[in-house]
Amino acid sequence: MAIEVHGMALSAPCRIVYMTCEVLGVEYNMVECDLMNGGNKTPEYLKMNPQHTIPTMKDGDFCLNESRVIATYLVNKYGKDDKLYPKETVARALVDQRLYFDMGVFYKAMGDIVYPVMFGGPAAGEDKMERFKEVLGWVNDFIKPTGYVAGTDCLTVADLAFLATFATIEATGHFDLAPYTEVNAWYEKVKAEVPNYAKCNGDGATTFGGWFKSQ
C-alpha cells in the first residue's frame, strides 16, 4: 500500500517528504491539500492532523505531521541501510542539528523575507537581508568539509531538507547567491542524486518562485 502525503508542491516542507520517498524508493501518493481553499480544515483532514498543518503523512492507519520527523520515520522504517539517517551517535546528532537548523534558522531566514511580500505585507528591512546572508554563510561553511551539509560522505535527510529550502530561495530570484560557491556546487550535485527531481522538488519550487515574482 502506498504512503499518502497530504500537502502542496508549493510547500518546501512537503517537498522534503516527497524527496525522501523518492530516494528510498517508497511508493507514495501526493494528495493535494489546498491551504488557500481550506483543504486543511476539513473534518477528514483534522482527524488526521488536528494542527491543520502540511504535510501530513498517512502510512496505513498511522498519521504523522512535521516534515523532518516524517523523513526520519521513513528512513527508519523503509531504509535498506542507514546512510540517509545514520545510526552512529555523533553522525546522527549532526544530521539532527542540521534538520533543526533548517526548520528554525535557514527556512525561517528565507521566510522572513519572502512571505511578507507574498501575502501583501511590507518588504523586509535590511536587517532581515543581513541575517539571511549570515545564515547562508553558515550553510556554506557546513558544506565545505565534505560536500554535504552534515559532514557525511553521502546524501542524508539533512541535505534533502536544505535542498527543499535552497531550491525555493533560488526560484524566487530575489537573492544574490553567486558568492556562495560551495552551496551552489552542492545544489547541482544533490539535485542529481534525487530521482524524479522535477516532480518531487523542482517543479514545486519553480511554482513558488513564480508566485513570489508575481507580487
Image (spheres, rainbow, N blue to C red):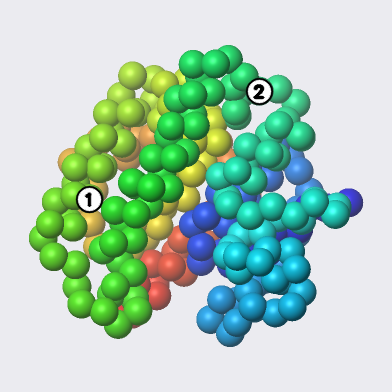
In the image, residue 173 lies at what x, y percent?
28, 62
**Res 39 label:** none
Give the residue furthest to the right: 1
- Residue drawn at point x = 45 percent, y = 25 percent: 94
Residue at 55% over, 36% down = 157
Rendered location of residue 27, percent (x, y): 78, 48
Residues at marks 2 and 1, CA–CA distance in whole angstroms: 32 Å
**Disc 1 designates what residue?**
132
Q: Could you tell me if residue 170 is visible in this image?
A: no
* Residue at image location 53% in from the left, 81% down from the top: 36
Count of number-bearing discs = 2
- Residue nearest the viewer, comparing 51 with 11: 51
Q: Is residue 38 positioned above or below 18 on the image?
A: below
Res. 16 in view: yes
Q: Is residue 46 above or below residue 105?
A: below
Identify which residue is drawn at 63% across, 54% down.
65
Q: Secondary structure at mark 2?
A: loop
Please name the residue that numbered disc 2 is placed on. 82
Residue 13 in picture, x, y percent from top left: 52, 55
Where is residue 4? Give x, y as percent. 76, 58
Looking at the rendered structure, the secondary structure element under dot 1 is helix
Q: Are marks 2 and 1 in contact (CB under 8 Å)?
A: no
- Against 49, is 99 above or below? above
Of the 4 image quadrants, the one containing the C terminus is: bottom left
Q: Earlier in the sequence, mark 2 or mark 1?
A: 2
Q: Nearer the viewer, residue 87 or 9?
A: 87
Q: Residues within 10 Å of mark 1 (few under 14, many from 20)?
A: many
Q: Residue furthest left?
A: 126
Label 2: how many residues lie within 10 Å, few (<14), some (14-19) or many (20+)?
some
Q: Is residue 190 left or right of residue 65?
A: left
What amino acid is labelled 2 in the image?
Asp
Q: Amino acid at mark 1?
A: Phe
